[in-house]
Amino acid sequence: MFNRRFVEGKERIAREHTLGAGHVGHDRLPPGQHLVRPDSFPILDLGVRPKFDPATWTFDAFGEVERPLRCTWEEFLTLPTVTVTRDFHCVTTWSKYDVTWTGVSFRWLAEHVGVKPAAQHVIAHCADLGYTTNVPLADMMAADVLLAYQLEGEPLPHEHGGPLRTLVPHLYAWKSAKFLRRLEFSAVDKPGFWEVRGYHNYGDPWREQRFD
């Protein structure tokens, strides 16, 4: 069961739009955000961290694609990787600069599975109680969007969504879905866990798109 008190609190914030703005540093920091210390990386989740068994774990890419993909953890680790360093912005107003991630480029994955013209959205399906989030396909095609399994050169810690999460650094961090298991290429938009609870459907930190 997810942390109901945590979820209800965030739903209340979305309804009331009462989340306080932090200070603005300079043009690298989106409005309403504040920086955390370089050695700090806050952890927010639903209170459920699903166990990872590399012997049974699988990843799927499916939907509006020519060649649906299913692979084991061992197979996933053989896919081409890239490393990016990007700033990370959470809807709860904290930001962290210069976070380094390694994983599979979403662009590479899209080419590998052969995305059909009908696909317009990507829905991340995760292992923590069916959590999902939605991102337009055009945004997922940005060069720095990853399926990340390393953080700062080490295996992605469980508390940060390991073994695998999406990284969509130009959107608020809830769009970078933890505990990723499946990516659905969809012709229609499918708002996810937080989106149906009052959070913005897109989530651009530079436009402070926290809530609908």
Image: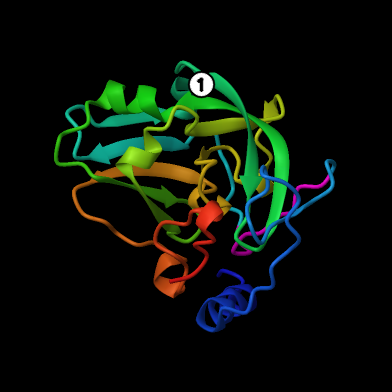
Residue 119, percent from left and from top: 20, 41
Residue 92, percent from left and from top: 65, 63
Left or right of residue 194: residue 117: left
For the N terminus, the image quarter is bottom right
Residue assigned mark 1: 77
183 is higher (above) or lower (below) than 107: below
At horizontal 54% and vertical 61% (from top left) the residue drawn is 208
Q: Which residues are magenta?
A: 40-48
Residue 176, percent from left and from top: 52, 46
Q: Magenta: predominant secondary structure element?
A: loop
At horizontal 42% and vertical 59% (from top left) the residue drawn is 130
Badge count:
1
8 is higher (above) or lower (below) than 144: below
The three-letter amino acid code for the residue at tag 1 is Leu
- Classify 10 Å Cα crowding around label 1: few (below 14), some (14-19), many (20 and above): few
At horizontal 54% and vertical 48% (from top left) the residue drawn is 178
Residue 3, percent from left and from top: 61, 71
- Tell me the element at label 1: loop
Q: Nearer the viewer, residue 38 or 43?
A: 38
62 is higher (above) or lower (below) than 51: above
Q: Is residue 127 magenta?
A: no
